[in-house]
Amino acid sequence: MDDLVAQLITEINTRLREAGHPVSIRRIKKSLYIRTNFDGRRIMHSTRLKATPQNCFEAEKLALRVVMGVDALPKDKKAQYWIAKFEKDYWNRRPRTPVTLNTWNNDYMYIYSLFPEGIELTERTAIETICSTKPDSRKRQSAVRAITALCKFAGMDVNFKHLKGNYRPRDRYIPNDSEIMEAWCQLDGTHWQWLYGMIATFGLRSHAFPQEALYLVSRS
C-alpha cells in the first residue's frame, strides 16, 4: 500500500504543479500534509488524514480548497497575514537566541501551522484550531496561549481560557548537590563531564544543547 500511496502523491503533485497551484501533498510518517508556498513562505499543514490511497484524493481536494480560499479572501483577513505580522513584532521585541528561537518554533509557529492555508482568522477558526490539539495536554495549553496572543494582536476581543484544560507536568525528582556531584564523578571522560556540568549548571536542555552551549560560549 505504501508504494501505491507514493505513486498517487506523485500523480497528484504533478496535476497541482501543471495547474500552477503553489501547493503539494507530502507524506510524513503515516500522515498526509499539505505544503504551501505563498509569497516565498513554505509552510507544512496537517490534513489530519492517514496516508491511505483514498485519503490521498481527500488531501488533493483540501489542497484545491486552500488555493480557492487564498484567491477569494482579502489578504488582511487571512490567518497567515496576521501570523507574519505577529512574527515580525515578536522579533522586534526580543533577541534571536537559541532559546528564543526554540520557544518560537515549538510554542508558536508549530501551533500556527495548524491553521489551514488561506483560512480567515476568526474566533470560530481559532477555536477549531485550538481544538485540533489533544485536550488536557501541554500542546493544548500552548495552542490557547499562542492563538490568544495572535487574535489579540489582530484586534480581536477573545477569551479561550475555557479550552485550556487541566494539564499538569508530571512530578519530577530533583537530586541535591551531593547527588549531582556523585553522578558527575562516575562519568568516564572529560567531555561527558563537561556536558553534564553545563546541563546541571545552566539548565541547558539535551535536545537543544549544541545551540545553547555555543551561545553561552560566544557570550563568555
Image (tube, rainbow, N blue to C red):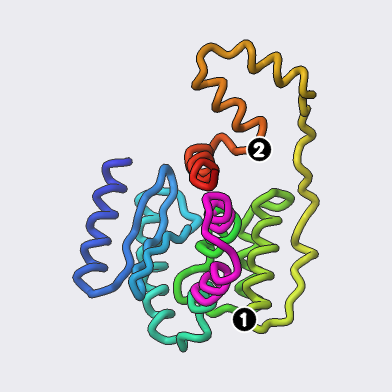
Residue at the spot 78% in from the left edge and 65% down from the top edge: 161
Residue reaching furthest to the front: 220
**Label 1 amino acid?**
Ala
Q: Identify the amino acid type marked 2.
A: Gly
Q: Which residue is mark 1?
A: 154
x and y percent of residue 215 in the render?
51, 46
Left or right: residue 41 versus residue 185 is: left
Instruction: Say above or below: 128 vs 97.
Output: below
The quarter of the picture where the C terminus appears is top right
| Of the two numbered discs 1 and 2 in the rendering, the one whose residue sits closer to the viewer | 2
Cα separation, mark 1 vs mark 2, equals: 35 Å
Quarter residue 149 falls in: bottom right
**134 displayed left or right of 38:** right
**Residue for point 22% across, 74% down:** 19
Characterize the local packing of mark 1: few (<14), some (14-19) or many (20 or more) Cα atoms within 10 angstroms.
some
Residue 203 marker: 2
Indicate the position of residue 151 as horizontal and vertical percent values.
Answer: 65, 76
Does label 1 or label 2 sit earlier along the sequence? 1
What residue appears at the point 74 percent right and 50 percent down from the top-left corner? 136
Magenta span: 84-105
Q: Where is residue 25? Give x, y as percent.
A: 34, 59
Q: Residues within 10 Å of mark 2 (few under 14, many from 20)?
A: few
Q: Quadrant of the N terminus?
A: top left
Residue 62 location, quadrant: bottom left
Identify the element where label 2 is drawn.
Answer: loop
Q: Nearer the viewer, residue 76 or 180?
A: 180
Residue occupying the point 59% across, 38% down: 205
Main SS, magenta residues: helix
Q: Which is nearer the eye, 30 or 81?
A: 81
